[in-house]
Amino acid sequence: MNLPLLLEFTKRDLVEKYSGSILGMLWTFLWPLVTIFIYVVIFSNIMGSKLPGSSSAMSYSIYLVAGILPWTAFANTISRSAIVFSEKKAIISKIKISLPYLPLYIVLSETVVFIISVVIYLGFVLGSSSPVFAWIIFVPWIYLSHQVFAYALGFLIAIFQVFIRDLREVTGIVLQIWFWFTPIVYTTDILPKGVKEWFAYNPAWIFIKAYHDIFVFGKIPDFYNLMIITAIGHGLLIISYLLYRKLEKGIRDVI
Amino acid sequence: MIKTESLTKTFRLYNSPADILKELLFGKKYHTEFHALKNVSFEVPDGQALGIIGQNGAGKSTLLKILNGVILPDSGTHICDGKTTGLLELGTGFNPEMTGLQNIYMNGLLLGMSREEIDQKKAQMIAFTELGDFITKPLKTYSSGMVMRLAFSVAIHAEPKCFLVDEALSVGDAYFQQKCSRKIKKFRDEGGSIIFVSHDLNAVKILCNQAVLLDHGEVVDQGDPEQVINLYNYMLAKKTEKMDTPVCQAGTSAEGYGNFQAKIVSLRMLNDLGDDVDYFVSGKPTVIEIDLISDIELEDITVGILIRDRFGQDVFGTNTFQLKVPIKLQSGSDCTVRYRIDEFNLGAGKYTLTVAAHSQAVHIDDCYHWIDNVKSFEVLSATDFLSIGLVRLKPEVELICRGAGNSEEVILR
């Protein structure tokens, strides 16, 4: 699988679902715009939520969206990669195509959506005259670290999903639970003592926290933790690739 | 060049996906094995075509999939020196909402072309499809033949070194089929290797330099297409024999009609070797034998044959009345009518044979027994020269050349 094909897959993924519609590609921008708008308006202006210890009306919205955007990219990459072999069955069963490369178009597509969303988000932040911090330059690295993780995990699930179709549903449910066990909607302050410590073992919390640090608190992210998640991601990558080498024949037979 | 060496492929068949899980967890065997290919070896040099024939389930598709790299063999190797494209993936990745042109890009990229290559060949591809303005319309507005034309055009312009052709060509109208065959032949003559899988035995004969006969995953025969096809037909005939379908049973209304005063009890159609088969070579001697019995004494029996083509059109028919062979039968006696045809000059194709026994010239007065389409058979092209159409006339060609000045004549046979 070559780069032009990968890009074509990505393009199709972004544009295809809107093909035949009047606004077409514009929808790719409209969705994140509307989502962010809703979060900001509802939580800041209607519900008047505020971060504990903050007086800014926008603080909770900024906190919420800073976590939701990377989580969406992360979770979508996993859940969509997990079923990519079933989805692209028509192509895999007819054309020689490298299976490990296939989920990459999902990573790329989610990245495009993420970039668009972050730009819109930054627009809101600036528009509400909240500060944007210089640590934002670390976002690409943080993003890369959790997307490697997401790709590896998604690919790993995809290998099994070929044999066990139920994994599609299981993945969806686990991601749902994972979301609520990660402080995205709420802050860690509301957690009882004893529970909080355990959250340190949640890989998602590591990178979500880094985004919070950058966008909300204006702090430099914790590099040590980010190194850990990068390492875990690559470890997973190796495991899933070795497993794939062992099971490729079976996967292709079943597809 | 395409080369395979002892390709073997076994599929594990599970009753349910859960069985796979159980097997992985407990190590107990939950599958039955299906041997799709056993030790398949062959070689296709550049500029040649190999036909693969065999019954359904013989392993033809599995073989193509392995050559295409879509599935992996259990053991054995296969080499294709260069890009391999299959016509089996006609239209893979087509999106009905997108225009023909947009689909050309996606399909071309999937077939391993670069964007520049597609830009270059776009015009050629579109010209070949003869789609005209439709190329800028969404694919959903196309007829299935048009989609196929687009798909074939992209596949052949992808310029593979090895081309795998499945039954795909059987779609599309006759005009485009011929256009495709010409293109495929050109591809072969320019040095490409072709693997051609088809049930169209004549096409295999015409296109291929050699053929492989697969049966239950094994190579049964390999070599000259004609010889391999003959063996295949023999195998098919044997299979029908085993199924023990009665050719005709006199007296039962399901098998023909008539007053059954005389009954046709059996029928044989023999080739030049005297074997009762379902395929015949055009121009070779052929014999049709019809066995007849009668319970009562009949003075005037006419036995006729009628050959129809696959559309049910009468191609040839005659009877013993016209041939002036009067037949009489004592009560309880029987006879065999043998039509000996020295040159069975039907064109290549599928035909059926209808036989009948009646009185006089036609069956209007006394129809003893009439059986429609009692036998199907196929006529294969002869090897001395190829022809098309229902009949095989045997023209002699004379060539009269005239020089510029003096009238010089040369006659060539």
Image (cartoon, coloured by chain):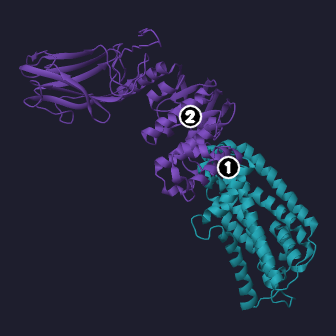
Chain colours: A cyan, B purple
> From the viewer's perspective, is B288 left or right of B73?
left
Q: Earlier in the sequence, mark 1 or mark 2?
A: 1
Q: Quadrant of residue B190?
A: top right
Location of residue B208 in the rendering, given as x and y in whole percent from the top left corner: 53, 25
Q: Is residue A194 visible?
A: no
Helix, strand or loop at disc 1? helix
Q: Quadrant of residue B241?
A: top left
Q: Is residue B337 visible?
A: yes
Location of residue B220 in the rendering, given as x and y in whole percent from the top left corner: 52, 23
Which three-letter amino acid code belongs to the residue tagged 1? Leu
Do callouts 1 and 2 mark residues in contact (Cβ within 8 Å)?
Answer: no
> From the viewer's perspective, is A210 left or right of A71?
right
Residue at figure coordinates x 78%, y 79% from the top left: A64
Q: Is residue B109 above or below residue B232?
A: below
> From the viewer's perspective, is B330 left or right of A121?
left
Residue at figure coordinates x 89%, y 62% from the top left: A228
Quadrant including the N terminus of chain B: top right
Which three-letter amino acid code belongs to the residue tagged 2? Ala
Give residue B348's mark: none
Residue at figure coordinates x 31%, y 30% from the top left: B245
Location of residue A82 in the rendering, given as x and y in whole percent from the top left corner: 68, 58
Q: Quadrant of residue B42?
A: top right
Q: Label 1, on which residue? A: B25
Mark 2, Cα crowd under 10 Å, few <14 / some 14-19 / many 20+, is many
In this rendering, the label closer to the viewer, 1 or 2? 2
